[in-house]
Amino acid sequence: MERSIITRAKSAEMAVEEALKLLAVSRETVQIEILEPGGRGMLGLGGKLAVVKVVVLPPASAAAQTPSPSSTGAASEAAEAPRSGEPPADPGAPPAASPGFLEQAARPAETAGLGRDGSAERRESASPAASAPVSVATELASASGTPETAAQEASIGIVGGRFVIEATGGSHPLLTPPAGVLMYKNGTPIEDKVSVAPEDRITLETRPEPEEPVWTLELDDKAMQAKLQFRPAFARTFTLLDSEPRPHLVVPVEETRTPLPLPAEAVRERLLELGVVYGVRGDRIAAACASETPGMFVVAEGTPAVEGADGKFELTFETETKRLGPQSREDGTIDYREIIEFPNVTEGQVLVRTLPPRPGRPGRDLLDRPVEPRAVNAVQLMAGKGVSVTEDGRRAVALVSGMPQLKKQGIRIHLSILPKLVQRGDVDLKSGNIRFRGDVEVSGGIQNGMEVEAFGSLTVKGTIGSAAVDASYSLTAGNLIGAKVNVGKGNAFLQEIEPLLLEIASQTQLLQSAIGQLGQTAAFKLNDLQQAGLGALLSVLLRGKFKSLNQTLTQFMQQMDKNETQLEDEWKAYVAELKHGFFDARSGGFRGPSELDAFRRRTLDLYGSICGPQDRPIFIDLQYAHNSHIYCGGGVRSARGAYNTMLFCQGILESGGTLRGGVYFAGRGMSIREVGAPGGVATKLQVPDTAFVKAVRVLEGTVVQVGSRSFQFVEEAQNVNARLSPSGELLLF
Amino acid sequence: MFAYKIQENGQEAIVMFEGDIDIDSSEVVEEDILPAVSAYSSIRLNFGEVYFVDSSGIGLIIRMVDELREAERNVRIEAVRPEVMEVFELLQIHEILGEEVFG
């Protein structure tokens, strides 16, 4: 077998030089065949390349060849040949060469038999750096040294990495290359099943087939992590496995995958290109580059900021209104009255202590920029009525005794104390009507014709006659006889202005952004705003785009004027600010956007102070109601029932006695011991369609209405549970 | 810079404004222009050469139109440059003055 190579170059001489270099042999040990002499193209354009085939002579024949014509001479001679001699008749035929050369080329089989070093098919593209090709060769049966296989049948096998081919006169063995592996028959790639003859040269592509590594390096949005997505590269090499001779051989091969590590330098360079100078983890890069499995590797990590903590506060008082069960007295009777315990503080008591915020520590990102931790906020104490905040803002102290009220808005704590008025004895003509901004406790009763209004809770130990009684939060009382009771309706005025304030705040925010937008336009000059304030602009906006804000502001001011007498200073200052800011064009109104923003925040503060989360429950607790009108924003409990009373409550109505005559509505359902009157006094229970009516005993004539469905009981019933079915039918049991 | 020119056309006066209508132009408008045009029954305000306005200028335009209309004059604003029109639109001047003014 021969080692040979075909090379192309501008001239035959250069092609030979190249071939010798690739084969790493000297000129004396080769035969040279000029396949294409090369030369200039037409009109000197597109020169044709010279093609030469250089065959390494086996040592013996190389010796026999001596003294061969000096190879330089041979090459130049050969190159001259086509020109000097007659042009070949067949253009496909190789150009004439020296007779010795032809002779050599004509008996490859014999040389193969002599030279056991085999042949190396090396293509021009083969890189010199690639691993040295392993020689695979077919051998003549006679030379294989395995006479046993010389049987009758045609067969092909592999022994020691070489093909052994036997053919009979009538049949040739067949060969199928393994999938994905390149094989050659006499230098031509084998596509599919082929027949082979003993003289065929079957070779396996043994050059490692490198796969390109795939990797990307990305920084996250915050430049805190660099992630390397990496699919490692492998070089696949195939080697032949030995096989028994058989008529049809599917060539068995073994695949070796050698991982090609990713150069760590490439990763580092890319990191630098991305600007990563901080947090590069050499160990992680090394581990990622050496990885044999694809994956994602974090190769650089910034130091995150250490978050701080906002300020905290601690309360020194109970905030819950406790609802105890009825208490047993020492004499064995049960006290139904002392069932509510309100939180209470005394004068001078520290209500709240604040703890300062703990600032965080900045970190660094991959680009070595500082990463700031979230800003931390201190708790802000806002003193309302009856409360004073110490100068350092750390503590709030009660100025009066009473019931503390706490409203939380983010980091702001609004504290106030509802003072308590204690009326010893009855409310009568002697005491006069009571109207008090706080809790009221009456140790006696309330006589006919009197009025009591408490802006907190009202506790009446005795009986309320036909008096008008209002409480903002709760009423605890004995009997009501002909009373008119309103609980939890809230202050009508505050209820009126609450939505207005919210509207003002949200419209002001829109106003702020509209002004900002205006500042962006090319034709609008801002310098007069700085000189003269926002007044002129606001008056235009209030006439045009913000007409509705104008209406809201006007409505709000009307409400404020009407109720001026009961306003606190806080509110008066707010109204003054509003009037000046929006409606006083002469003085210029708000000085600028920041003042407008301050106004908006103040509006929200005020809104929060009147409608923060309800910190006190709304309810009525009483013994018995007779011929009374009762409204309650929460639930109502009557220990012994009611007679001929109109009751409307938003919560649940619980009655321990009998509801005899009257109309009772409960927004969230009712639970009653007995309802109705034997004499047939009309009694009506009503709940919305989502609620229920539960009654242990319902007397005849009682009407129960759930949603829009109602039913009149014609005879007494026990354990009634009325509600609507999903389809809207009234279910009674 | 602010300047103006009044063209007379029978019962109609055309006020050609030139320059910025801003905090500094109110004197000229209120003391010179308004008295000069109030004799005409129809007044056209041409803003073709007005490149900038500020909030006082806008207020001034509104006042000018309001006052003339109160005196039962027919007022029209015309040739507003697109960049100034952008400001007008943000402030909804059309709604304040009525579309007919821009007809």
Image (tube, helix red, strand yellow):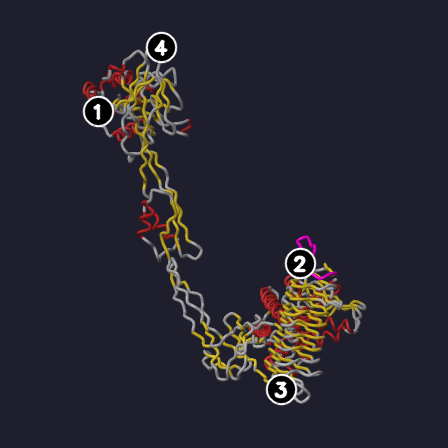
Q: Nearer the viewer, mark 4 or mark 2?
A: 2
Give the class, few, some or many, for how many residues have Cα within 10 Å of label 2's Cα (few <14, many ≥20): many
Q: Earlier in the sequence, mark 2 or mark 3?
A: 3
The answer to whether the residue labelled 4 contacts the one labelled 2, judged by CB atoms less than 8 Å apart, is no
Q: Which residue is mark 4?
A: A170
Q: Tell me, yes or no, whether dots 1 and 2 are on the same chain.
A: yes
Q: Earlier in the sequence, mark 4 or mark 1?
A: 1
Q: Secondary structure at mark 2?
A: strand
Q: Quarter holding the N terminus of chain A?
A: top left
Q: Is residue A152 above or below residue A263?
A: above
Tell me how far mark 2 sits from mark 3, CA to CA. 45 Å
- Name the kind of residue labelled 2 in the image: Arg
Tell me how far mark 4 sits from mark 1, CA to CA. 44 Å
Q: Earlier in the sequence, mark 3 or mark 4?
A: 4
- Name the kind of residue labelled 4 in the image: Gly
- Range of residues picked out in magenta: A714-733
- Name the kind of residue labelled 1 in the image: Glu
Q: Which residue is mark 1?
A: A28
Q: Which residue is mark 2?
A: A723
Question: Which of the 4 image quarters holds residue A355?
Answer: bottom left
Q: Which residue sits at x=73%, y=60%? A: A711
